[in-house]
Amino acid sequence: MAAEQTHKWIGFDLGGTKMLSKVYDSKFKPLGSNRKKTKAHLGVKSGLERISETIRDALTDAKVDISEIAGIGIGCPGPIDMEKGVILDPPNLGWGEVPMKKRLQQEFDCPVAVANDVDAGVFGEYRFGSAKGVRTVIGVFPGTGIGGGCIYEGSILRGSRCSCVEIGHIPVIPDGPLCGCGQRGCLEAVASRLAVSASVARSSYRGEAPFVQKAAGTDLSLIKSSTLADAIKAGDEVVEQIVRDAARHIGTALAGVIHMISPDVVVLGGGLVEAMPKLFVRDVMTAAQDRVMFAYQDSFKVVAAELGDDAGVLGAAAWAEKMVNGMSSE
């Protein structure tokens, strides 16, 4: 068997509430995994130690030695300097600049590729999921924030210094609500799960959402994506209106991206979409088609992600493979 066929890969996804690491064989069949809570307000030093611990525990679960690993792919929120592997001040972590690639290469003594977590998730959907093999795919993943990514002809679209397609920070409401990035009126400030849950909590306080009032009161930590979906099924009309408004904001922001990039497929992922895929696909598609030029109306389709939590971790591992193989062919 050729040496490259024995290579194993590690994927790691740093989400808003969880860390997930998986070990894969050369065909990307999972061999072992480990999941931990991210923990709120975790400092940089403790955060990096927890990342390393999660990776090591995944290796233990897979019964694989680090010497068998050809590369590690890391997906992290926020802008990323992909050449240097540096996280550039992620809005929802508060870590500042973190030399992730250098730190992990020193510890594990193997190549490390660092990408934005949604870029990694969209790459996973492009390689293995709902956008497999298309020329251009845009991904939008609403969660604690709203992440975006683009795969163009098999590679992650990036800018001169860092990752791009930060669709969550497209301004949609002039002088609107304050966003975690410090600006006002960003898409993330009005259409993320956190923003939706905050609006629903206000409605619950006013007695307009009886299901939510009984199930979660006004506690944001209890108003999860599944709670919102259950409230809509139970007949909380104001919750449905808030969620659909968020979907329409996403579709409106997407219209501008479609004019610039003209993707074959738009992939929607994240907890909100997983809980209400039909609603989001329908309303995002309708809003985007209503706002694009006539020539673009039939040029794209909107689909839900297929891989769930595996999109980011699998995409990160596959991106590491692409980067390592690209270096070896130079």
Image: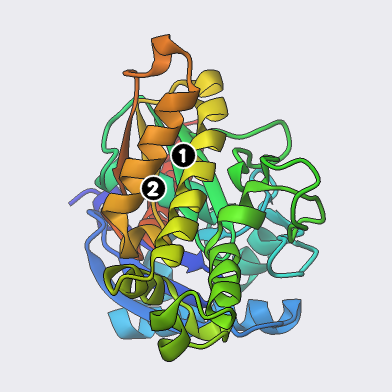
Q: Is residue 244 left or right of residue 221?
A: left
Evaluate whether residue 279 shows in this view: yes
Residue lying furthest left: 1
Residue beneath disc 2? 268
Q: Nearer the viewer, residue 315 or 101?
A: 315
Residue at 37 percent of width and 19 percent of height: 297
Residue lying furthest top: 295
Identify the disc placed on residue 328.
1
Q: Nearer the viewer, residue 301 or 57?
A: 301
In the rendered image, residue 18, in percent from the top left (x then y), is placed at 49, 77
Q: Nearer the viewer, residue 218 or 297?
A: 218
Q: Give the number of callouts.
A: 2
In the rendered image, residue 135, in percent from the top left (x then y), is placed at 35, 24
Residue at 66 percent of width and 43 percent of height: 83
- Vertical side of 74 occupied by 254: above or below: above
Q: Is residue 124 left or right of residue 259?
A: left
| Amino acid of disc 1 | Ser
Evaluate whether residue 63 shows in this view: no
Task: For label 2, count other residues whose C-alpha is less than 10 Å away and answer few (under 14), some (14-19) or many (20+).
Answer: many
Q: CA distance from mark 1 to mark 2?
A: 34 Å
In the rendered image, residue 228, in percent from the top left (x then y), is placed at 40, 71
